[in-house]
Amino acid sequence: MEKGYSLHLQRNLNLVRKYRVAYEIAGLTVGCFLFSFGTNQFLAPAELLAGGLGGICVIFYHVFGWPMGIQYFLYNIPLLVLGYIHIGKKFILYTIFSVVISSFFFDWIPIHAIWTKDTMLCAIFGAMISGIGAALILRLGGSVGGLDILSRVVAKYYNISIGKFGLIFSASIVVISAYLFDFQSALYTILSFFVGTQTYDIILNIAQRNTVMIITNNGDDISAELNKTLNRGVTSWNAVGVYSHTDRAVLLCVIVNGEWAELLRVVKMIDPDAFVIALPTQKISGNFHVDW
């Protein structure tokens, strides 16, 4: 009977993994579309440069007329080989998929402004849309290739942080933009970098993990409701208030930032006097998932 249960559990786990992979592939495809759409429909028509390899592709598109998609794919080949040697297998496989799909969208989506020709609006919304796409890809375990791969390899072997390497590369893009176009285009490019970085951080912080501790008189009720509402496991133990000398329950739960408001609503609805603490959590090993 125990063997039959184990086989049934294994089949369920395999089914969950298949659904998870399909879900992630769909999300990667959406992210690739947004990344390419923001570049081709906003940044490139306004002669603004994206960060990383996207910016290099825009430069050579305007100078030589080389197709964006073919450039993006070819430039990533040596970097993907480098990443496969030095970085995790899943990351590289998802990155290869993202590079191929992004290259297709770069060629499929026409390079012309469709909603506005205002340079500032193109800088803001182009960076915002591309940033959402790139952040979504990263949250699902891949990347848009190029600078993401190279910066991780450099950071692994040399005393240069990923942020510092990206800043150096972006500064080079701005200098090239000023030389090829004009200083106004370079300033708008800096604006697009800033908006893209802020969008990137906002999207990633939504899924930042936090360990929450709840001290309450209604441990069982809150645990049951959190499990039902957020589908999060809760660990509890008994404690005693030193000042009040009353028995309390301490609940431990790990959530993402996007679930904080709902967790607080549930806790305060059941116990308005509950004491809640949230601590940023960098690494987790165990049964924890993030749904997008």
Image: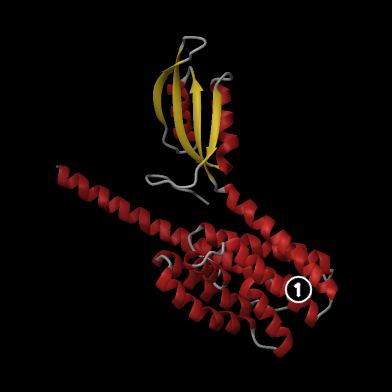
Residue type, label 1: Leu
Q: Residues within 10 Å of mark 1 (few under 14, many from 20)?
A: many
Q: Is residue 125 visible?
A: yes
Q: Nearer the viewer, residue 147 or 132?
A: 147
Residue located at (80% from left, 68% from top): 188
Residue 84 sits in quarter: bottom left
Q: Is residue 37 visible?
A: no
Answer left or right for 193 relative to 205: right
Q: Is residue 217 above or below residue 279?
A: above
Q: Residue furthest bottom?
A: 64
Q: Position of residue 287 (x, y in %)?
A: 38, 44
Q: Is residue 250 above or below residue 211?
A: above
Q: Secondary structure at mark 1?
A: loop
Q: Nearer the viewer, residue 4 or 260?
A: 260
Residue pointed to by mark 1: 48
Q: Position of residue 148 (x, y in %)?
A: 55, 67
Q: Nearer the viewer, residue 254 or 13?
A: 254
Residue located at (55% from left, 34% from top): 278
Q: Position of residue 238 (x, y in %)?
A: 40, 20
Q: Position of residue 206 (x, y in %)?
A: 59, 48
Residue located at (55% from left, 30% from top): 277
